[in-house]
Each structure stands twice: as C-alpha cells, then as structure tokens.
Amino acid sequence: MNSEKIVFNKPSAIDGMAVHQLVASCPPLDTNSVYCNLLQASHFNETSVAASFDSGELVGFVSGYILPNKVDTLFVWQVAVSEKARGQGLAKKMVSSLLERSNCSGVRYIETSITASNQGSWALFRSLADQLDAPLEESVMFDKQIHFNGLHDTEQLVTIGPISL
C-alpha cells in the first residue's frame, strides 16, 4: 500500500491511455480498445472518476453513465483499482464521490453488471448497498449462450435502490 495521497478528478482524454493500461492490469475486467477508454474519459467524464496519487499516477478509475431511458439510474460500467492502491476502500470511495456530484443529484438507482466469479465486484456493490441502506437485486442481463455464444460468462444485472442522496 502506497502512502501517497489519492485525489479524485473528472477524467479527460489525456487519461485514456492510462485508463486502458490500468484496466488491462486488473483482471478479470474486460479490456476495451484505447479508443473506447478515450471516450469513457472524455464523453462520459461527468459520470466517471479518475483517482491518482499526488505524483499523477492513475491508480483508480470508475466509468459510468446515466441511462438514456432511465434518467434516475447511474450505470457503473467499470471499476478498476491498481494493486498499488488496494486495501483502502478506494473503489467504494470513487463510486461514493461520483454520487456526490451535482449531475448525479437525481440518481435513485445504481446498476452494474457482474459475472458470478467476480467476487471483488460483488463485495463492492453489496457493501455500497449496505452503506446506502438500499436493497440489492440481481437478474440476468446478458446470458452466456444467448448473448455471448458461450464465449463469456453470464453478466448479472445488479440494481441498488431506491437510494436517497
């Protein structure tokens, strides 16, 4: 664990390559193209968080967006934390800081998708539901056979809410 202070910011396109490298270093996260990470860090920066050491090294990233047809729902796309910053509750702090932003003031639900084997994500979102004193529900979002032709594990849709901010 590094003793440097961690600061949270809205990401920008300058962070895109660092996001790509961070996600790649955090299995079992699915890596996207650098272009996708550039879009996450620029087009979705209002609903994303970049966590960096004082030195500028990116050690955490949360990407998300408000669902177009459910404007009270924040979909958390990916959560990545560098090994250098694990064990500090950084993932939950990043999501919590995102919920404190004015553009998330209307959020009443948080959604994400998690595979059954991703115990770190399950622990994060269960802990977040407890912190928010909100129920957590799950259902199939993308099925292994139907949506992934057997090439990727089923993604469970996790819904937390309603929440009060």
Image (tube, rainbow, N blue to C red):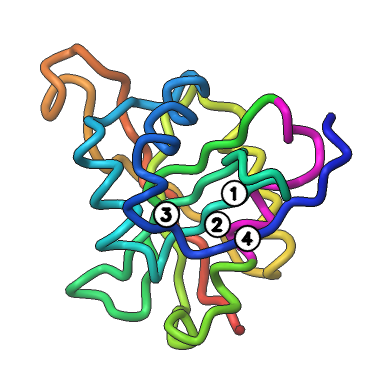
Closer to us: 92 or 133 = 92
Mark 3 is on which residue type?
Answer: Val
**Residue 8 marker:** 4
Query: Magenta stretch?
Result: 84-96
**Where does label 1 land, which residue?**
125
* Quadrant of residue 12 within the rendered picture: bottom left
In the drawing, does residue 41 fall left or right of residue 80? left
Dot 4 lies on which element?
A: strand
Instruction: Please name which of the two marks, 4 or 3, marks the residue nearer to the observer.
Output: 4
Measured in 3D between alpha carbons, the distance from the residue under mark 2 to the one under mark 3, in whole angstroms, is 14 Å
Is there a contact, CB below 8 Å, between mark 2 and mark 4?
Answer: no
Dot 3 lies on which element?
A: strand
**Residue 136 marker:** 2
| Label 4: few (<14), some (14–19) or many (≥20) C-alpha neighbours in 10 Å | some
Residue 83 sits inside the magenta stretch = no
Is there a contact, CB below 8 Å, between mark 3 and mark 1?
Answer: no
Residue 26 screen position, x and y as percent: 52, 23
Mark 2 is on which residue type?
Answer: Leu
Measured in 3D between alpha carbons, the distance from the residue under mark 2 to the one under mark 1, in whole angstroms, is 8 Å
Dot 1 lies on which element?
A: helix
Residue 68 screen position, x and y as percent: 19, 72
Mark 4 is on which residue type?
Answer: Phe
Magenta stretch, overall SS: helix
Closer to us: 164 or 9 = 9
**Where does label 3 land, which residue?**
76
Measured in 3D between alpha carbons, the distance from the residue under mark 4 to the one under mark 3, in whole angstroms, is 16 Å
